[in-house]
Image: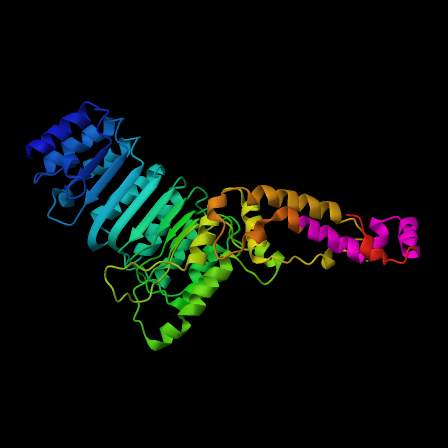
Amino acid sequence: MDNRSQDLLRKIRWDDDTTKRLAIDGRIVRNRSFNSKYEGDYTRLSKCIAKNTQLISLDIDLRGESALDITSNEFYDNLEQNSTIHTLTLHCAFRNIIDSVGWRILNVYKKKRNLAYLNIFGAKLENGGDTFIAECLRSCTHLEVVRLSLCCINNEQLLPIVEAIRDLTSLDRLDLSSNNIKGEDVLKTLLEDPEFNIRIIKLDRNRITNDCAVRLANSLVNNTTLTCLNIEQTIQWTDSVARRYPLYLARYTELLCNKTSINSTYKSNHTLYFLKLTSPPIRNINQLWQLPPHMTYLLNLNKDKNKSRVAIKKILQYHPNIDMESLYAWDLDGEWTLKSLPYVVSWFMKAKEAAAHDEETRFVDCPVSVFDVEKRKLTAIYQFALAMPELIVPASHVKATARRGRGANKNIVL
């Protein structure tokens, strides 16, 4: 055991409150790593871990020669006695997770059920490894972050993992980057789940085509939780891919703001504010590809925590001429009335407040008049007055003005 490992062992033994993270076999956090060629040193370390009340994170690197491979059961028994470690990171060196050191450590925390953060890198999930990982996820019901990266996960292996993740109500972040995930069917079941609570998902560096990503966007229409999505892929840029790329961008733009109708805009996704998509090849290596400005604008709008205000801003910008006719027949019998007018006026009052919020970020390819809410409110009232003048102006007044030789509609008082 080197001097650094001896010093770390002393700190853990004496419950040093500055030592919160422990890396074993040392390639993760070098100034807090423990390394030895002797099994007895690992046994002594485990006894100190059992009594320690300051450690919160354990990082184990299996990429090199390690005495951890021959450690007796005493190491794992002592590890189970610790009550404060809730973050576990395993670098599995592309070994099969079953019957490995990683498998034995995960079994410890599968029993303890207290993990909040689980990070696994480079683990092969053959011979039932996917089922074992799913069992661990189900057991650790307090998980907030799950990272399964470089694990060669395919669609078949993903299925039991996703089924287990759906039961984790506290899960906030899911990282499935650098795997072999191809389709979107399994992921759609997760994104469309009404109990979905995950805010951040990373699916970059998989094998998801742009067409699959488009279908994935369809499952996000009613999602009100996901804020960050990374689906950037490394794909072969063919003529076919290039021709369909505008449709790929258009679908995610429509997800953020469907402009076909006011109701569609209202029902658009107002939650997603970070989006990383597959980019076309860049000829200039010094130039970074960015999303189109209108998509960036919509994503920035979605950062506002007041989602009602977000929806109002999108409606104001993308529906400059709001037709009120559909609101005339609010009466149960279909008769035209002014019953909806107070609601219209109230909406424009809220819109005025929304338009005044973050003025510096609102004008993107949009005339200033679109956000002149007072003028648009008067236009809406005028539409009601023009359609139902007898309900705006008393009948006697209308007759009087008509006798003076002027059309009633020309003398409407708003």
In the image, 222: left or right of 239? right
Quadrant location, the N terminus: top left
- Location of residue 277 (image quadrant): bottom left
The answer, for residue 336, to whether it is visible in the render is: no
Residue toward you, 299 or 317 = 317
Residue toward you, 412 or 318 = 412
| Horizontal and vertical percent position of residue 66 | 12, 45
- What secondary structure is the stretch in magenta mostly built from? helix
- Location of residue 388 (image quadrant): bottom right
Residue visible at 46% across and 65% down in the picture: 250
Residue visible at 62% across and 57% down in the picture: 262
Q: Residue furthest top?
A: 14
Residue toward you, 383 or 142 = 383
Residue toward you, 10 or 364 = 364
Q: Residue furthest front?
A: 404
Q: How many marks?
A: 0
| Horizontal and vertical percent position of residue 289 | 32, 60
In the image, 181: left or right of 402? left
| Horizontal and vertical percent position of residue 234 | 29, 64
| Horizontal and vertical percent position of residue 329 | 78, 56
Is 380 magenta? The answer is yes
Residue visible at 21% across and 24% down in the picture: 16
In the image, 315: left or right of 344? left
Is 308 magenta? The answer is no
The answer, for residue 85, to whether it is visible in the render is: yes
The magenta segment: 377-403
